[in-house]
Image (cartoon, rainbow, N blue to C red):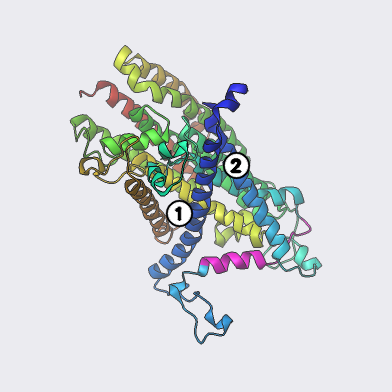
Amino acid sequence: MLENYLPVLMQMLMAAGFAGVTLLASVLAGKSAKRNKMKDSAYECGMLPLGEAQPRFSVKFYIVAMLFVLFDIEVVFMYPWAVIFKDYVAVFGAAIFWWMLSFVGILLVAFLYAWRKKALDWSS
Amino acid sequence: MGSFLDSINLAFIIAAAVKIVFFSFMVILPMVAYSVYAERRVSAIIQDRVGPNRTGIPLTLFGGKKDIALAGLIQPLADGLKFFLKEDFTPAHVKKFYYWLAPALVMVPAMMTAAVVPFGSELDLGWLAKLGVEGAWLHKPIKLVIADLNVGPLYIFAIASLGVYGIVLAGWSSNSKYPFLGGVRSTSQMISYEIALGLSIIPVLMIFGDLNLSKIAQYQDKNGWLLLPLWGEGLTFKRLVLWIPIFISFIIFVVAMFAETNRAPFDLPECETELVAGYHTEYSSMKFALFFMGEYAAMIIGSGLAVTLFLGGWSIPFGAPLGLGYVEGATPIWLGLLHIGCFLAKVVCFIIFFIWVRWTLPRFRYDQLMKLGWLVMFELALANVILTAALIVWLPN
């Protein structure tokens, strides 16, 4: 079974090799010109860079990241359930449906809470 | 460990290497190059322009009288050459290590996901024996998938998510305002739509009961595509009703895929009117090209996955009733090649669709994008999963 993963490793080495070789080739083949102060400065549409390079950004991005972790785990939990679903129903009946529905229901409460707290509201 | 090493033989490794080289360098990379060309030509047609139509064989370089234009078909090669020859510039204000790592981190996952997509049924090499080639490996048909894993879609989602790191690192290490904002936006967008993407294929998995993409393609070859269930068992009442959640799944999957690959109408991370070029503003030459190629490669693999899950993968429409279906161990070589051609044709159609959408629809606003992802796509996908489950349980056969 494990040997099926060997081609994945080979593919990864090939992809990393490809990226490395193209980057290296561009260094070797590309022209190099003189540096100057203006060329080295950050791009701000031709103006001199102003203020901090990394401005503060909305806390909503963090909230989205946290919600993502929660709900993505939910999705991953549903995969094994989905794969055995048909066979399980054929043998044991519909119980498996209610189990997952209760699991989704609990998470839905959390989702509604996040919604009510305006964690998902980006227009304000 | 001993038994693990014993189970691997040389023929297996060579076959895997040949498949990797063929699929990566003779299918994906040329497709990346020519989808860029197609994008430019199709957008030109849509906007009533001409597009790149001149780059051909430069006979004048070798003393000829006239160049051969070939409708600009050599353009991608010229572009590639130009990327190599441009100055490789690393600005002084960047964080060097991560600045260099980021383009590779976008390209590598995009190419790695190709490993589990079956690009054909089987290739029978038995005819080589008649030409005098010898070896036991000849008598076992070669499966046309690089790694025949039992976790296909999970592997693709796991690896494809790693692409986010490349974008976030590019935005952060550039140490400049526009890339930073582009990186933050892009990360947030990608993780939001990943949930809908993951949920959208659950109904599909419930119907197949399998995560192996080769088996999913074989099943569809025998019993009709998921979106075209017209042969095999035929169009029973149950399949007709189940077609509805599958179609909703397909729509969610395609929309989420557009958002995942940062394509229009969801191309906010690189929205020119606000953020110049988003996370790759500070990049040039081959480093920029790797971002570009990574995006197109992700688009091609995404199309490949959509085709495999919903549109029968390599299978020919009405293949099984016409005798063009896959029979394990007894698929002649011409049919194997036809299957590869069929898969590529479907992927090309999908890419044309991608391009068409990009030049037709306007871009979303950021709050609309997040609202669509969290409040429409997520809910719809979840409801669709429950609907499919209920239909499978209570629908009479």
Inter-mark Cα distance, 2 to 1: 31 Å
Q: Which residue is mark 2?
A: A12
Chain for numbered disc 1? B
Task: Determine the residue located farthest toward the top in the rendered image.
Answer: A92
Q: Residue at x 41, y 46 (%)?
A: B128
| Mark 2 secondary-structure assignment | helix
Q: Residue at x 47, y 30 (%)?
A: B151
Residue B90 lies within the magenta run? yes
Is residue B66 found left or right of B241 in the rendered image?
A: right
Nearer to the camera, B291 or A19: A19
Chain for numbered disc 2? A
Relative to B55, say whether B21 is above or below: above
- Residue B362 shows up from this direction: yes
Q: Quadrant of residue B10?
A: top right
Image coordinates of residue A22 in percent, x first then y, are: 65, 56
**Is disc 2 in contact with disc 1, using a CB cutoff of under 8 Å?**
no
Relative to B315, say whether B267 is above or below: below
Image coordinates of residue B180 in percent, x first then y, are: 66, 51
Relative to B85, say whether B64 is above or below: below
Nearer to the camera, B151 or B256: B151
- The amino acid pointed to by label 1 is Pro
Instruction: Tell me where the magenta segment starts and ends, as one range.
Output: B76-93
Q: Residue at x 46, y 29 (%)?
A: B150
Is residue B356 found left or right of B221 in the rendered image?
A: right
Q: Which mark is residue B265?
A: 1
Nearer to the camera, B17 or B239: B17
Viewer-side label of 2, 1:
2
- The amino acid pointed to by label 2 is Met
